[in-house]
Image (cartoon, rainbow, N blue to C red):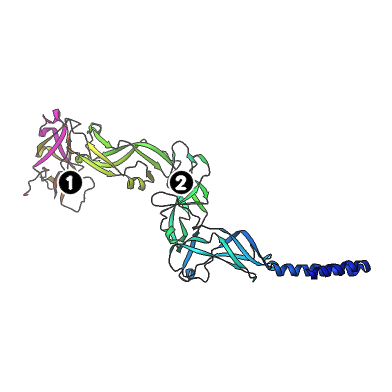
């Protein structure tokens, strides 16, 4: 303090004699005062808030083992440091780095690791505290997964009688990159758009750039640690014409006089919902499930027919929720009877006008007929005719066999379930040819 007192006295004396000397003396006094202050208190503390926490694994055992960090519970820290007054004032968020120490971390999983602080400017300092002092990080191997996308539109309506077919998305797949643990949870990928389209009656396109990922149990997954490529999609919405129709069958190979409406057939289901790929198509009120031979309808008849493939071949779409229709015969009022026809009731028709006689070989033909019980009960062989049509016959063959068409001449509600054959012998005509029937031994 004596030194300070002496300096002060000199300054006061100098002021009386020389102004310049007084100013110089004042500057010298300030410098001396600063030097004394530094010698008495050479360092000071400093607190810095909101220092970003660096998660850099470059050059660490984490990177060497092909691992990556995909989660950390700390983003910023507060640090307290101490150092020289002249230098510590230059330490700030730009010159200090807070980082996670990944030393000796070589496996996947969740780890609680220390937080360190370093200077990137080369200024020395003493670290007093870091808050928080540790960070919990999740470590995993990173990978990729390709998965098909499912278009998802939430604000689309269609005109009456119009329905959408399966949406078409382009591209059809997405590649997801991220931690293996998260990739394993991804089960479904939706490409989503909430754009509004109302009363659409023809096909249209929708742009979508939102990807939603779901687990197997239907929970939407957090995508913050995942990347999806591509991120932009075009969804095509085909619009179909829809109609509810009645399934029917076409009865074939029935005698001309047979009343097909007398067959009581049951369809299950009794209605179908179908759509045409042509949005402008007109759909009939009925849909033919199958063509069925009349002779197939025996008592207890029930047959299942596939419709999905048949509809697809016709350019139609099955929207019924079922793939087949069951056709059944209601036989509650029907009866069955076996009848043997004699030769006079076995005929041939459409005989060619050539140089041959066509001789029927069958002397008898046993058939099974079905019809209303009260009608069948009184039927006799004289009520039936078996006929073989020679139309479109193979003229190179001399012994022929034709399907017999059984006709009930006395009722249009009786039919035969026998798939009988009429055998015919082709012989050259002679002058005395007069018979159209020979025995099997001729």
Q: Where is residue 380, by image quadrant?
A: top left
Q: Which mark is residue 52?
A: none
- Residue receiving disc 1: 402
- Please give the name of the residue rendered at 12% of the width and 37% of the height, measured from the top-left corner: 345
Is there any visible trace of residue 63 in the rendered image?
yes
Is there any visible trace of residue 92 in the rendered image?
no
**Front-lying residue, 75 or 294:** 75
Across and down, in percent, residue 181 comes to 42, 59
Q: Of all residues shown, which one is farthest toward the left?
A: 441
Quadrant occupied by the N terminus: bottom right
Query: 369 above or below 213?
Result: above
- Please give the name of the residue rendered at 10% of the width and 34% of the height, measured from the top-left corner: 381
- Secondary structure of the residue carrying numbered label 1: strand
**Front-lying residue, 145 or 126:** 126
Give left or right: position of 77 versus 359. Answer: right
- Please give the name of the residue rendered at 42% of the width and 49% of the height, measured from the top-left corner: 219
Across and down, in percent, residue 259 comes to 23, 32
Contact (Cβ within 8 Å) of mark 1 with mark 2 = no
**Front-lying residue, 185 or 3:** 3
**Front-lying residue, 314 or 214:** 214
- Please give the name of the residue rendered at 30% of the width and 41% of the height, measured from the top-left corner: 289
The magenta span reads 363-387
Q: Nearer the viewer, mark 1 or mark 2?
A: 2
Q: Which mark is residue 238?
A: 2
Q: Of all residues shown, which one is farthest toward the top?
A: 374
Query: 194 above or below 271?
Result: below
Across and down, in percent, residue 434 comes to 11, 42
Across and down, in percent, residue 7 comes to 83, 69
Rounded to the nearest angstrom, the CA distance separating label 1 from label 2 is: 50 Å
């Amino acid at each position: 303090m004596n030194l300070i007192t002496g300096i002060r006295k000199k300054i006061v004396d100098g002021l009386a004699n020389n102004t310049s000397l007084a100013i110089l003396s004042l500057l010298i006094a300030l410098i001396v005062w600063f030097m004394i202050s530094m010698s008495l208190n050479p360092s000071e503390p400093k607190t810095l808030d909101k220092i970003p926490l660096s998660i850099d694994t470059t050059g660490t055992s984490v990177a060497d083992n092909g691992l990556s960090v995909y989660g950390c519970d700390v983003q910023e820290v507060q640090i307290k440091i101490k150092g020289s007054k002249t230098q510590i004032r230059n330490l700030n968020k730009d010159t200090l780095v807070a980082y996670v120490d990944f030393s000796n971390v070589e496996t996947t999983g969740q780890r609680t690791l220390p937080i360190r602080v370093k200077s990137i400017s080369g200024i020395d300092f003493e670290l007093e505290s870091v808050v928080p002092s540790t960070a919990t990080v999740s470590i995993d191997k990173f990978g990729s997964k390709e998965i098909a996308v499912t278009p998802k539109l939430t604000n689309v309506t269609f005109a009456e009688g119009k329905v959408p077919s399966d949406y078409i998305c382009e591209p059809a797949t997405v590649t997801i990159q991220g931690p293996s643990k998260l990739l394993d949870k991804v089960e479904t990928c939706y490409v989503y758009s909430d754009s509004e389209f109302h009363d659409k009656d023809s096909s249209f396109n929708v742009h979508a750039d939102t990807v939603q990922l779901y687990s197997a149990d239907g929970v939407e997954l957090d995508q913050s640690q995942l990347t999806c490529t591509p991120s932009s999609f075009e969804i095509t919405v085909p619009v179909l014409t829809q109609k509810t129709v009645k399934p029917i069958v076409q009865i074939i190979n029935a005698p001309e006089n047979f009343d097909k409406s007398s067959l009581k057939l049951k369809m299950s289901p009794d209605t179908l919902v179908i759509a045409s790929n042509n949005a402008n198509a007109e759909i009939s009120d009925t849909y033919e499930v199958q063509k069925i031979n009349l002779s197939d309808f025996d008592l207890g008849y029930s047959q299942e027919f596939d419709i999905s493939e048949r509809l697809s071949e016709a350019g139609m779409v099955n929207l019924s929720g079922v793939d087949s229709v069951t056709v059944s015969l209601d036989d509650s009022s029907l009866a069955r009877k076996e009848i043997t026809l004699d030769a006079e009731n076995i005929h041939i028709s459409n005989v060619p006008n050539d140089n041959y006689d066509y001789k029927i070989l069958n002397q008898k033909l046993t058939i099974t007929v079905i019809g209303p019980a009260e009608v069948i009960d009184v039927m006799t062989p004289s009520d039936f005719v078996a006929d073989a049509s020679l139309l479109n016959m193979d003229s190179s063959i001399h012994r022929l066999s034709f399907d017999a068409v059984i006709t009930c001449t006395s009722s249009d509600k009786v039919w035969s379930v026998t798939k009988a054959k009429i055998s015919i012998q082709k012989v050259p005509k002679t002058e005395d040819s007069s018979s159209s029937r020979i025995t099997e031994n001729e």
